[in-house]
Image: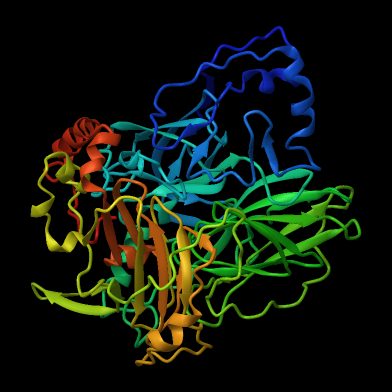
Amino acid sequence: MMVTTKVVSNMLLSYAAIFLWWCLVPVGGAVALGSSLEQPVTPLLRPRSQRLQPRQTCNTATNRQCWTMSPAFNINTDWEASTPVTGVTRTYTFTLTEVNNWIGGDGGIKAKAMLVNGQFPGPTITGNWGDRINVTVVNNLVSNGTSIHFHGIHQKNTNNNDGVSGVTECPIAPGRSKTYSFIATQYGTAWYHSHFSAQYGNGVLGAIRINGPASSNYDDDLGPLVISDWYYGSAFALAHRVNSPTNPYIPGFPGSPPPSDNILFNGLNRRANGASGSYRRFTLTAGRKHLLRLINGSVQASFTVSLVGHSFTIVATDMVPITPVTVTSLYIGVGQRYDVIINANQPVANYWFNTTFSSAPCGGATNRPAMIFQYSGAPTANPTSAGTVPPDSRCADSLNYTPIVSKSVPSASFTTGNTLNTRLQISTTGGISRVYWPVNNTPMKVNWNNPTLEYVKNSNTGTMPANTNVISVPTANQWTFWLIVNNSSIPHPVHLHGHDILILGASPALAAPINPTNRLRPYNPSVDGPALKIANPTRRDTTMLPAWGWLALAYRTNNPGAWLMHCHIAWHASQGFSVQFLEQLTSIPTVMNLNELTGNCNNWDAFYPSGAPFLQDDSGI
């Protein structure tokens, strides 16, 4: 694995390491996010009298709310307005390869794996709040293009680094490479994955950890825990079958996917028959509090997690710090993340960490998904208590979280004028029937050779085809409101790139079994309008759209670019469940260098379609 860290600033190596970080914090290191962040800031050495006490008292186990004292950055800092500039660049090289009949972390054989630096999940990107992150992606896949999306990273003024094939770039052609570069203006837990059809289901994903303050104190950071469904078949082969209405995995339900063969915990688990693999183990130290970064990196499965005998104190939803909430179980939709604190206050022993599926249709597995949390000093053995089954989530996430940094929308501003309808649709073209998930009757299909930002660069966005599902939101720094209506029995995890969603409300989740025929509970302005939460509602980048129901959301147009909003079930994104918001069109070329598109697109044009053994047959994202 090639992972290097380059410190852009000059370090004064003669000083003791305990003072090094404080010495290197730039004087006046805060910058407005609208300013240029492209040039590293050379740190200035403060007088010794200003350097000693603050670093000894900030961001310790008893004061995690603080990050730096001078300049002051802490849990109450609005990182949409200002962020530190550390002058540090974290540099990674990710080489993508594919292996047929790969033996995975449970001992099962996957027909085709696509790996990052030869491993699943890929290496964790780690940095501090305000660092620059550079990731060079080398595409050594045999016949696939690729692009890497940094899920949850807002890419403030760097939409051309968002990594969406056919939207923000041409795919990276086989044998070619591309470097992504951005400032970590946020902190918390994110993840990266390919955004080229259903490719990440073959293994192209990994965690992102940006260190920063927390809303509750803890002693140890256990790091990311990527929980992901795992299919032994190729993701592309599965997608082809899911896209066919004549051969569903569940009879009578066109487009239904199979249960996954396993659920992996940072790439590891036992097989369903117990013949191979091993349980993932994390270590707890008695009497200490541990931060755990939970990531659902699945293509299909949502689930509820619980740790026998323990509770979780939630301190962040996606990358939004919240007022701490303590729960005994936690539902995690596809693409969602939670930062939680585990208090190791139980007897020294081994405890099951269980993953439980809903009775509603949002994923499943043929295996009992579990891992083990082992107290330091406990014998290495399987736990003796299975615990109790948590309440059925009904595939719904809680909307009762309170962000630390308050953001509210204007009262009486929500209307149903911006409504996005989705439903399952079967269409026949050229004698071939396919399953689609259109939005307002149009399933998305992007052009890999002519991405949206290329249209912006050439000033011809008016000629974009209707099936690119472009929605213009030109006004800067205004609230935009959307009502999403789900005319189906399937809940959907909805993810917005480049922004956090303010979740104003949603229809109640339905109890299973969910009737496949129409049970739509429409939005009623006279009843549902007054119940919308406009004062500091739950805020995150991924949330659940209920079956036969609606979701009301808002976001502020403060980030120029072409931003995708889509269902994060890989099959549904492949089938067209997506739109793209073209935000502040005239500002896009002024805040990023669109000429950077040219080299990568030239390489892709030389490969596709003339040199490719396949043609695009889905949405492309």
Q: Is residue 414 left or right of residue 616?
A: right
Is residue 204 visible in the rendered image? The answer is no
Q: Percent position (x, y) of residue 583?
A: 28, 51
Residue shown at 52%/28% (left/top)?
85
The way the protein has been coloured in the rendering is rainbow
Q: Give 95 or 539, whichever is nearer the viewer.
A: 539
* Figure label count: 0
Q: Residue furthest front?
A: 411
Q: Is residue 453 left or right of residue 294?
A: left
Q: Give 613 or 152, whichever is nearer the viewer.
A: 152
Q: Percent position (x, y) of residue 98?
A: 39, 44
* Vertical position of residue 95 compared to residue 165: above or below: above
Is residue 289 visible in the rendered image? The answer is yes
Residue shown at 73%/69% (left/top)?
328
Residue shown at 45%/40% (left/top)?
116
* Vertical position of residue 370 compared to residue 139: above or below: below
Q: Percent position (x, y) of residue 40?
A: 46, 21
Q: Percent position (x, y) of residue 79?
A: 52, 43
Residue shown at 77%/72% (left/top)?
386
Q: In which quarter of the image is residue 73?
A: top right
Q: Residue furthest top?
A: 14
Q: In this view, does 49 lie to the left or right of 433?
A: right
| Image quarter in which the C terminus is found | bottom left
Q: Give 397 or 29, whichever is nearer the viewer.
A: 29
